[in-house]
Amino acid sequence: MFTFVISIIVLAVLGFVFAALLGYAADYFRLEEDPRLQPIIKILPGTNCGACGSASCHNFAERLIKGEVQVSGCLAGGVEVEEKLAKFMGIEGLDVHKKLATIHCGATEKQRKRKANYIGVKTCQAAELVDDGGLFCAYACLGYGDCYCVCPFDAIRMEEGLPIINRNKCTACGKCVEACPRKIISLRPFSHPYVVACSSRDPGSYVRKICPVGCIACKICEKEVPQLFKVVDNLAVIDYTISDIDADKAVEKCPTKCILKLP
Amino acid sequence: MELFGIFFAAFLINNILLIRFIALCSFFGVSTKLDTSVGMSSAVIFVMTISSAVSWIIYHFILAPFHLEFLRTATFILVIAGLVQLEELYLKKIIPHLYRAMGIYLPLITTNCAILAVAFLAIDYRYSFLQAMVYSLGVSFGYSLAIVLFAYIRERMALAPIPKWFQGYPIAFITAALMSLAFLGFTGMFGL
């Protein structure tokens, strides 16, 4: 009987002591945290990708509250997060444009002509250092997937030596743009379907020899849709400030099919 | 020398994961990546040392005088759960960086059987307070060593050409078994 009673008492007292200690500690160690911090962290993607320049999403939230960064600072979250943050922080009338990474090369592994076989370290960064990675075209995708490796959102897959962007997963964080040693990745407006899949500034006669899908600067696109296309330095360039324009004709007439209309 | 013996025995010869096979769930659960395994082991070192100290004190000064040794399972679970909560509050306030680094692993440790096992074993071996401390340090460092080594191997295995039928957990179990065999080689070292 004594053991029975004493064990109940001991456990009850221990439980009570711990409860009291925890209750006291919860009060004593109360964190004077900005009440806006947790909701902001919930809005942020939480991948800690670092594209915004802050060490982590937590860090970004703290700096946002202090006013050191803007609501548009979260590149990975894109428009969705920016709108939510703006709404939460009480900012209105922001001009937001959702973007998408775009590869400006359309030559697959087989289509790229090689002058030598590159057998070094299998990264674009290393290949670029050694005589254009053995390719004739100094603007072609090297195909070792540096962009694929660096993408924090699994939005790039490699197909026949070319990176393909998954438009649903891409957040336009810009990591691939930085990673590409040839600078053939850029960000374009999300809703803009037209892409020039070539970055070659070589003269048309040379491009014609080394690539079946390169821009040969024939200026047909410029003739068809002069508002949108312009040939600069032997390369067709799209003016992305103009939206809602039908340029299917240019896509059709492009002799090397390097202007693409993506879904 | 005796303390060194206790530490070394707990660290390598009776390694809690590879020789005693305690806390295997976390061994396989959080060892897929190196940084998660480092986070888990730092949390284990921290919690194990403190919880075994407190449970030793409670056992010897509260349970033993009243002859309530049979209550130790319930009491230790209560102690560990309460302590982890307390440590979480403390870290969040005082060392927020460490708190964020440990992240989810700190509350998860409440249910890690290695913590409870160490509290029991330190009493079963009739260790003094200092010996119990050294013992729990040894065990927790042994845990860290095993899980970090294992995480290194698993990171390599993710890239290795493994036959389809062995991919994932099967090869992990085989690797753990081989590591366990290797650790058996420490038996008898220093006459322990």
Image (cartoon, coloured by chain):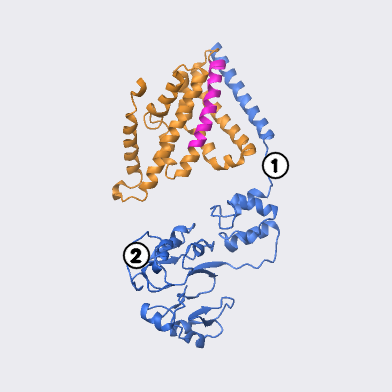
Position above or below: A126 against A211? above
Residue drawn at the location 48% of the way across and 36% of the way down:
B41
Q: Chain of mark 1?
A: A
What residue is drawn where x is 38% and y is 31%?
A: B21
The stretch drawn in magenta includes residue A162:
no
Residue at x 67% of width, y 30% of height: A24
The answer to whether A24 appears left or right of A204 in the picture is: right
Q: Quadrant of residue B142?
A: top left
Expressed as whole percent of the image width and height from the top left, the position of residue B120 reads 47, 22
The amino acid type found where label 2 is placed reads Tyr
Mark 1 lies on residue: A32
Badge 2 is on which residue? A118
- Report which colour depicts chain B: orange
Q: Quadrant of residue A209?
A: bottom left
Determine whether the residue tagged by mark 2 lies in a helix, strand or loop.
loop
Where A166 falls versus A113 (above or below)? above
Give the camera-side residue of B79 and A115: A115
For the N terminus of chain B, the quadrant is top left
Q: How many discs mark residues in the rendered view?
A: 2
Residue A1 in sight here: no
In this picture, which residue range is highlighted in magenta? B41-63
- Name the foreground residue: A151 vs B109: A151
Q: Main secondary structure of the magenta part?
A: helix
Kindly identify the residue that appears in the image at 42 percent across and 21 percent down. B5
Side (left or right) of A151 relative to A53: left
Chain drawn blue, letter? A
CA gap between label 2 and label 1 equals 58 Å
Task: Tell which of A5 and A80 is nearer to you.
Answer: A80
Which image quarter is the C terminus of chain B in? Answer: top left
On what subunit does the disc labeled 2 rest? A
2 or 1: tag closer to the N-terminus: 1
Asked if badge 2 and badge 1 are on a common chain, one would say: yes
